[in-house]
Amino acid sequence: TGAVFGKFAWQPPAWMCWLGRKPLIAALIVLATVATGAGGWYGWHWYQLRPRPHTVDLTIEPPALTQYEKTPVIVSPVVIRFSESAAPLHLVGKPVTTGLRLTPELAGSWSWRDDRTLEFKPDGDWPVGVAYSLAFSKKECFAPGVVLSSSEVAFNSAPFTTTIARSELYQDPTDNTLKKLVANISFSHPVDESSLKKAVAIKLGQGLSFR
């Protein structure tokens, strides 16, 4: 093999030579290394097999767009649904006044619709396109022993949108310079007509009429 691979020389490091002269210390180091490895394996095994608390999942339904065409208008609640019974029995069907924090704050009322459904109804309409976060205090508004999979959820109120249902370009047959764009535009939320006319007139430099 020497003719093919050549000759290799290896010299042990100083610490190995030192341990070779102190067998008791070397044995202690080996035992400590084995004990550390065994302890790490046992700890990992215990972590994998440890009892884990049962958690209750939850989903949130953001408020639907307010039905402005109704009289009176219908404002939808935000609804939190739990995978299993979570409400204290004495609060089912009743208002919840503690243990919930909505950010940013909004005047309204919380209540348990049933033992798995919690809802919030604002006193007025939802602000347009606002991001909210909801934090729970587990001890104050849930049944004993209920552990949530998440103690905070987020949702958004409906954004402002516009939809052009139909548009038509009209040209006066007697005046080629007179042209009009007739469009049907729907808005998700009520708008101030005078402000909208002013804004569009500034953009287009023309008059605007509503029907």
Image (spheres, rainbow, N blue to C red):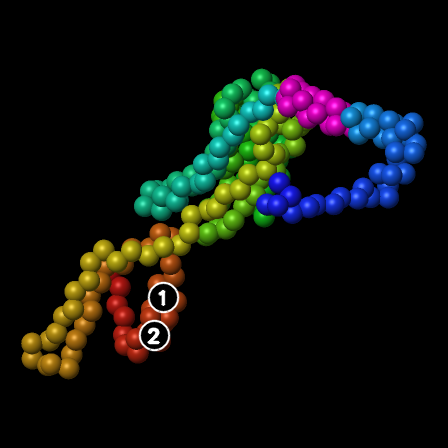
Which residue appears at 78% of the width and 26% of the height? 34
Can you tell which mark lies on residue 133?
A: none
Using the rendered image of the protein, determine whether residue 32 is visible from the camera's viewpoint: no
Can you tell which mark lies on residue 203?
A: 2
Quarter assignment of residue 144: top right
The residue stretch that appears in magenta: 36-52
Work out which quarter of the rendered image holds the C terminus and state it: bottom left
Quarter assignment of residue 47: top right
Using the rendered image of the protein, determine whether residue 31 is visible from the camera's viewpoint: yes
Relative to 79, 98 lies left or right: right
Distance CA(mark 1)–CA(mark 2):
11 Å
Q: Is residue 130 magenta?
A: no
Instruction: Name the residue nearer the viewer: 43 or 94.
Output: 43
Which residue appears at 48% of the width and 35% of the height? 60
Q: Which residue is mark 1?
A: 196
Q: Position of residue 189 (x, y in %)?
A: 38, 53
Q: Earlier in the sequence, mark 1 or mark 2?
A: 1
Which residue appears at 58% of the width and 24% of the height? 55
Relative to 176, 157 lies left or right: right
Q: Please name the amino acid that badge 2 sits on.
A: Lys
Q: Is residue 45 magenta?
A: yes
Residue 65, compared with residue 110, is above or below; it is below
Instruction: Name the residue nearer the viewer: 178 or 4.
Output: 4
Q: Please name the amino acid that badge 1 sits on.
A: Leu
Instruction: Name the residue nearer the viewer: 53 or 89.
Output: 53
